[in-house]
Image: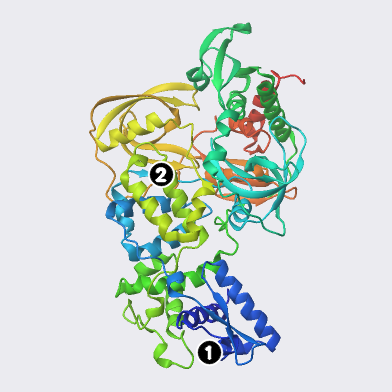
């Protein structure tokens, strides 16, 4: 957004807030000088209409009404923003509620609603919400939104916009086009789902985002969601879809540690293998685990499971066998912001949030304020300069008094903007969905503060609070709530634990004595940060790989430093790291971010080459098998050849059907 447009919109908001009676268009054009820059009267009218629409899209309630003029056959349209509709209600939060609100907002730090959550939290700083209050909570969940098409589906579901997309159901090789009215979306079992009304089947249907193919296209029109719709109720039907099913797999002796931990029973099979009988919810996940074991495991039943493993290995082998195009790796670009319109939205919203923030913190430090708003000190100075010249054109006393010469910010005469604006839909969703997600977690979810905060926030959000029935996120249903609760208790009680811990790279279960410190989640997976006495160093342990917990006494080591940030990445570079180059299909581009790719290259065929660092390469062949053809090893040459041989041996267990 240009600085002039921002100034014009800001002046429009200030003007419309300044009077109960409102302004006519003519009066606004006189009051806001920048409208005079339009080339023609018709262009000015269109500019005003675009500005109104933009403000309403941001949740700013521009109201229009007709006022009878002198003659009965004529009316005058007036515009205003009512203070009670604009301002965030005066709800207050206790320190305990402030802590869980901050936790809920931080859950989106690496996700699509990250900027919306940050804006919402800034608005609540005037209601007693302080980020420091969350420092004492040794837990940091995060919500994963890197499923394909998340942003498009989110926009459609929250704006009541019909969509069209290609869809391939499980067990089907054919894709069909679906026309859907999105009612809501939610995550279960590590995947995001769209729930909506399928126009061609005239019934409610559930679609997994990862099975959507091609673009998700927004269609003209709108619709009404049934009053009794609730996303949690609809997604509960997935419990039947993911009901435990029997599966059989043969594994070599000493191999398949993860599968053995799940086995209901074990007996002898052909070729000296052990036959494992399992009950699993997700055959797709089991197929990926089996493919990653390569020739050491052979899927036996059901046929759907066998076909899934065969397909994964066949596609992985085909991808690995393709000739490599030439490419030159360059430094990986910084992750792009997900929301394309965030710049336009953020600039105006930042200005409107800045005034109540400073009024509540007169004398605020420039550097600290810039950090709180996620901008540079130079950009903050430009924002303050813009505020200084904004206000009614014909009333000089209406201008704000802004001072920041000594790196301390003071604002006076800003009554109309003194309260934060009500939550927009994205902001309300970020906090309400975050709190709802917290409420389902073992341990913290039972806190009275979570329930009271959710109730207060839903009421304060007004109409935007209805998003709680349309969006729901659940963190890794398979992570093991009992283990998570045990770990939280050990952290709170500073107790030492002995873990039975699965190490997939070595395909073995080990015993670890640890002093647990904190819990955090990354990409829907929970991790325990702890002091490992065997390594004599801090280590992160995946919670879903912990298969036994035993308390062994008081913890011996100290907790992290007060205020220490949770890990932003699971990867710590080392001087002896090896460099591996993978070629990724678009569906596997998440690997670049998840594994901190340092260099990348776009390939002519639409794939992307990425360079990763790793302490060892033994896990790479299994990783490509798990990804089922969306990734292949490009280098070094010996690893590329070893991966090809590994996949050939594994695929030999599955002759063509």
Q: Secondary structure at mark 1?
A: helix
* Above or below: residue 379 compared with residue 430: below
Q: Is residue 115 visible?
A: no
Location of residue 338 in the rendering, given as x and y in whole percent from the top left corner? 57, 56
Numbered label attached to residue 589: none
| Rendered residue at 72%/59% (across/down) | 220
Location of residue 535 in the rendering, given as x and y in whole percent from the top left corner? 34, 31
Q: CA distance from mark 2 to mark 1?
A: 48 Å
Numbered label attached to residue 31: 1
Location of residue 59 in the rendering, given as x and y in whole percent from the top left corner? 52, 66
* Above or below: residue 352 compared with residue 463: below
Q: Are marks 2 and 1 in contact (CB under 8 Å)?
A: no
As rendered, which of 18 and 562 lies closer to the eye? 18
Taking the image as shown, residue 471 lies to the left or right of residue 160, namely left
Q: Which residue is mark 2?
A: 438
Using a 10 Å C-alpha cutoff, classify the residue at mark 2 as few (fewer than 14 neighbours), some (14 to 19) or many (20 or more).
many
| Rendered residue at 69%/84% (across/down) | 43
Q: Is residue 624 visible?
A: yes
Using a 10 Å C-alpha cutoff, classify the residue at mark 1 as few (fewer than 14 neighbours), some (14 to 19) or many (20 or more).
many
């Amino acid at each position: 957004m240009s600085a002039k447009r921002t100034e014009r919109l800001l002046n429009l908001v200030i003007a419309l807030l300044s009077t109960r009676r409102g302004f006519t268009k003519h009066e606004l054009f006189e009051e806001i000088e920048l409208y005079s820059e339009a080339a023609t009267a018709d262009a000015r009218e269109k500019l005003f209409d675009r500005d109104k629409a933009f403000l309403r899209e941001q949740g700013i309630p521009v109201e229009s009404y007709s006022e009878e003029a002198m003659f009965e056959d004529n009316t005058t349209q007036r515009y205003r923003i009512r203070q009670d509709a604009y301002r965030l209600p005066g709800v207050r939060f206790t320190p305990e509620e402030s802590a869980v609100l901050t936790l809920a907002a931080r859950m989106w730090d690496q996700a699509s609603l990250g900027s919306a959550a940050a804006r919402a939290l800034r608005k609540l700083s005037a209601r007693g919400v302080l980020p420091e209050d969350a420092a004492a909570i040794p837990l940091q969940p995060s919500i994963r939104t890197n499923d394909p098409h998340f942003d498009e589906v989110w926009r459609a579901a929250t704006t009541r916009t019909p969509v069209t997309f290609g869809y391939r159901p499980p067990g089907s090789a054919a894709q069909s086009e679906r026309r859907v009215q999105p009612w809501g979306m939610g995550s279960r079992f590590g995947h995001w789902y769209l729930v909506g009304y399928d126009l061609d089947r005239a019934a409610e249907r559930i679609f997994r985002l990862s099975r959507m193919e091609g673009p998700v296209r927004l269609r003209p029109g709108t619709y009404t969601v049934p009053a009794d719709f609730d996303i949690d109720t609809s997604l509960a039907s997935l419990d039947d879809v993911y009901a435990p099913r029997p599966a059989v797999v043969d594994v070599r002796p000493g191999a398949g540690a993860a599968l053995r931990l799940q086995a209901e029973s074990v007996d002898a099979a052909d070729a000296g293998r052990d036959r494992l009988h399992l009950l699993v919810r997700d055959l797709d996940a089991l197929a990926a685990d089996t493919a990653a074991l390569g020739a050491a495991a052979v899927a036996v039943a059901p046929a759907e499971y066998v076909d899934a493993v065969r397909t994964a290995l066949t596609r992985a082998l085909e991808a690995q066998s393709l000739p490599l195009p030439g490419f030159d790796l360059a430094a990986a670009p910084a992750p792009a912001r997900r929301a394309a319109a965030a710049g336009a939205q953020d600039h105006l919203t930042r200005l409107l949030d800045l005034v109540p923030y400073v009024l509540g913190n007169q004398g605020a430090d420039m550097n600290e304020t810039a950090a709180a708003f996620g901008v540079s000190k130079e950009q903050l100075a430009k924002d303050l300069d813009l505020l200084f010249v904004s206000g009614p054109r014909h009333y000089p006393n209406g201008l704000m008094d802004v001072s920041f010469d000594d790196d301390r910010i003071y604002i006076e005469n800003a009554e109309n903007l003194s309260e934060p604006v009500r939550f927009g839909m994205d902001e309300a969703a970020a906090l309400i969905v975050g709190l709802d997600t917290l409420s389902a977690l073992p341990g913290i979810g039972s806190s009275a503060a979570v329930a009271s905060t959710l109730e207060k926030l839903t009421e304060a959000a007004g109409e935007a609070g209805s998003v709680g029935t349309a969006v729901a996120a659940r963190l890794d249903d398979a992570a093991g709530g009992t283990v998570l609760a045990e770990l939280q208790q050990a952290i709170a009680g500073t107790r030492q634990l002995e873990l039975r811990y699965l190490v997939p790279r070595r395909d073995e279960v080990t015993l670890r004595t640890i002093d647990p410190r904190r819990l955090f989640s990354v990409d829907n997976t929970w991790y325990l940060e702890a002091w490992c006495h065997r390594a004599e160093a801090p280590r992160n342990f995946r919670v879903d790989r912990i298969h036994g917990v035993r308390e062994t006494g008081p913890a011996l080591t100290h907790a992290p430093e007060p205020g220490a940030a949770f890990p932003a990445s699971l990867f710590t570079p080392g001087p002896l790291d090896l460099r591996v180059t993978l070629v990724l299909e678009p569906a596997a581009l998440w690997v670049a971010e998840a594994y901190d790719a340092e260099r990348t290259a776009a390939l002519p065929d639409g794939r992307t080459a990425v360079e990763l660092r790793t302490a060892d390469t033994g896990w790479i062949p299994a990783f490509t098998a798990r990804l089922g053809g969306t990734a292949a090893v490009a280098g070094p040459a010996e690893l590329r050849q070893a991966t090809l041989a590994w996949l050939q041996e594994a695929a030999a267990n599955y002759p063509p059907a």
